[in-house]
Amino acid sequence: MLGSFSDVDGFEVNMGNPHQWMIRVGGRLT
């Protein structure tokens, strides 16, 4: 997964920003 992708919420996550996608993935798992 390089660049950016849209998650299940349609929120574009910038893979260049680990903190941002960690929040998105972590928030989905908790």
Image (cartoon, rainbow, N blue to C red):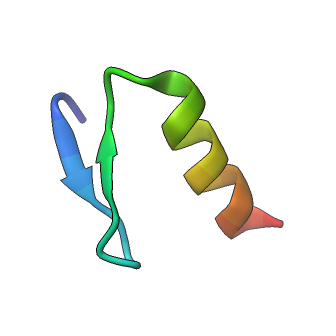
Instruction: Residue 23: give x, y in percent of width and height.
Output: 65, 46
Identity of the residue drawn at 50% across and 24% down: 18
Q: Is residue 30 above or below residue 1?
A: below
Q: Residue 7: image x %, image y %? A: 35, 66
Q: Residue furthest bottom?
A: 9
Query: Residue 10, percent across and down?
Result: 29, 75
- Image position of 5 with respect to 19: above or below: below
Q: How many marks?
A: 0
Report the residue at 52% width, 37% height from top: 20
Give residue 15's position: percent from left, percent from top. Answer: 32, 31
Q: Name above or below for residue 6 compared with residue 22.
A: below
| Drawn side of residue 3 relative to residue 9, left or right | left
Q: Quadrant of residue 14?
A: top left
The part of the image, by quadrant, that contains residue 22 is top right
Q: Residue at x 24, y 35 (%)?
A: 1
In the rendered image of this protein, does residue 2 appear above or below residue 21?
above
Indicate the quadrant containing the C terminus: top left, top right, bottom left or bottom right.
Answer: bottom right
Q: Residue furthest left?
A: 3
